[in-house]
Image: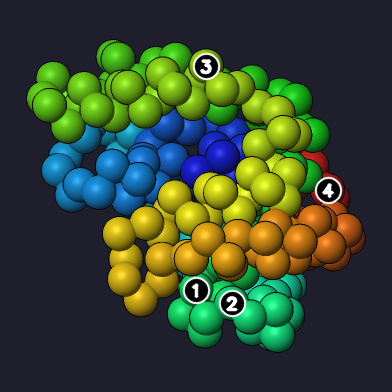
């Protein structure tokens, strides 16, 4: 599940900004490519624990496994390398789910509030400053369908895999990934309830 998805799911339990921010923090660490401690807030730590429980639940769901497997097959047939196809299908399904989750306006608002609280939650270190800059950029970007178009998803996947020799995308692989993302949008929408309903026993917007 992507950081936005984590924020939405966390907000179904508790919309307190530190908790929602913590639910996104492991993904932010990956994006910043750091293992440094970025916050010492106990509520952020609770959100981090929620993130890991949610991922374990989400990634084991049949709907997710099946959507990713189908995506890998389609991307391989379109000429995407095996490792890149696996990574792109995994990330792509999560990003497509973001579009469906963004329909929960209250949860989207909780996501934005959590980002706005980054300066008071981050450690006063260089890495904490980088975290605040990331949160500020995401806050300015807001929540919009334009970030989940096929082309945008392909670009975001390429950025996530940049610098990883076995997974990094070639320029020629962007178009088939964008086309797959557009074609898969309906399948993710149709299975949104299976993907998110009763995650950790929480009430989903879809059930």
Tell me the element at label 4.
loop
- The answer to whether 99 appears left or right of 59 in the picture is right
- Mark 3 and mark 1 residues within 8 Å of each other at the beta carbon: no
Which residue is disc 4 drawn over? 206
Mark closest to the chain's N terminus, 3 or 1: 1
Residue extending farthest to the front is 172
**Mark 3: few, some, or many residues within 10 Å (few <14, many ≥20)?**
few
- Mark 4 and mark 3 residues within 8 Å of each other at the beta carbon: no
Alpha-carbon distance for marks 3 and 2? Answer: 33 Å
Mark closest to the chain's N terminus, 4 or 2: 2
**Mark 4: few, some, or many residues within 10 Å (few <14, many ≥20)?**
some
Which residue is disc 1 drawn over? 84
- Mark 4 and mark 2 residues within 8 Å of each other at the beta carbon: no
Which residue is disc 2 drawn over? 80
On screen, residue 152 above or below 62: above
On screen, residue 109 above or below 65: above
Tell me the element at label 2.
loop
Which residue is disc 3 drawn over? 140
- The answer to whether 144 appears left or right of 28 in the picture is right
């Amino acid at each position: 599940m992507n950081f936005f998805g984590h924020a939405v799911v966390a907000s179904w339990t508790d919309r307190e900004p530190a908790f929602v921010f913590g639910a996104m923090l492991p993904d932010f660490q990956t994006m910043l490519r750091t293992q440094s401690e970025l916050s010492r807030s106990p509520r952020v730590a609770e959100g981090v624990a929620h993130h890991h429980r949610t991922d374990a639940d989400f990634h084991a769901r049949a709907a997710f496994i099946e959507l990713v497997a189908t995506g890998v097959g389609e991307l391989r047939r379109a000429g995407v390398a095996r490792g890149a196809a696996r990574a792109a299908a995994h990330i792509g399904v999560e990003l497509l789910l973001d579009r469906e989750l963004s329909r929960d306006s209250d949860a989207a608002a909780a996501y934005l509030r959590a980002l706005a609280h980054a300066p008071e939650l981050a450690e006063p270190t260089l890495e904490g400053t980088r975290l605040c800059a990331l949160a500020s950029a995401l806050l300015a970007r807001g929540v919009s369908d334009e970030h989940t178009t096929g082309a945008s998803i392909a670009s975001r996947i390429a950025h996530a895999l940049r610098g990883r020799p076995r997974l990094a995308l070639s320029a020629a692989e962007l178009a088939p990934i964008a086309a797959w993302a557009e074609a898969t949008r309906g399948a993710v929408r149709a299975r949104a309830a299976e993907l998110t309903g009763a995650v950790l026993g929480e009430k989903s917007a879809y059930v």
